[in-house]
Image (cartoon, rainbow, N blue to C red):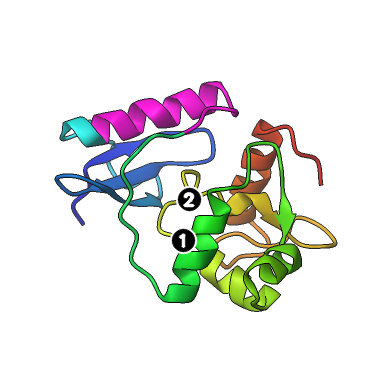
Amino acid sequence: MSFSAVIDAPPGRLAITTDANNLLAIDYVDKRTALQQPGDDLARSVVEQLQCYFDDPGYAFHLPLKMAGTPHQMKVWQHLQRIKPGKTVTYGELALRIDSGARAVGNSCRRNPLPIIVPCHRVVSAHGIGGYGGHVSGKVLDRKSWLLRHEQVTI
């Protein structure tokens, strides 16, 4: 697969995909995926802004995003971008805001193509951390835990 950049980051190795004008995807990849310097100005800006976030969890991203999804997914992703660093909302609370169901919100979070930038990690269960990327335990959930601790959220 061709990426615009691959970087090591505290929650895991990240592969960044851009087109000429927009950030398209951020994927967690394993250590076998080779590191790659940013291939263009936008990828360089994404890497720099991610580093700013890792240095300061209150950092606000300013990137052109292009996300493709269902109308429901797009609505969830738009609402995710309104959750401030250090704050959380439950799946049920977000579902009420958009007249949906908690499970549908969780499924849309799982399909978020821009984790960290579109902060699905800030959506939690009413009784704990919830899932991340479709997982409820293991290394993937450790990433969500790291992101929340980084933003000084305790669950």
Check disc 2 and give the amino acid type.
Answer: Pro
| Position in image of residue 109 (x %, y %) | 55, 64
| Disc 2 element | loop
Q: Gap in Å between the C-alphas at discs 1 and 2? A: 6 Å
The answer to whether residue 140 is seen in the rendering is: yes
| Position in image of residue 101 (x %, y %) | 67, 78
- Residue at 39% across, 34% down: 62
Give the vertical position of 122 relative to 72 (above or below): above
**Mark 1 surroundings: few (<14), some (14-19) or many (≥20) residues within 10 A:** many
Q: Which span of residues is magenta-colored?
A: 43-60
Q: Is residue 110 magenta?
A: no
User: Within the image, what quadrant is residue 93 found in?
Assistant: bottom right
Check disc 1 and give the amino acid type.
Answer: Asn
Q: Is residue 129 left or right of residue 150?
A: right
Q: Is residue 119 left or right of residue 85?
A: left
Nearer to me, 154 or 73: 73
Provide the residue designation for mark 2. 115
Magenta segment's dominant SS is helix
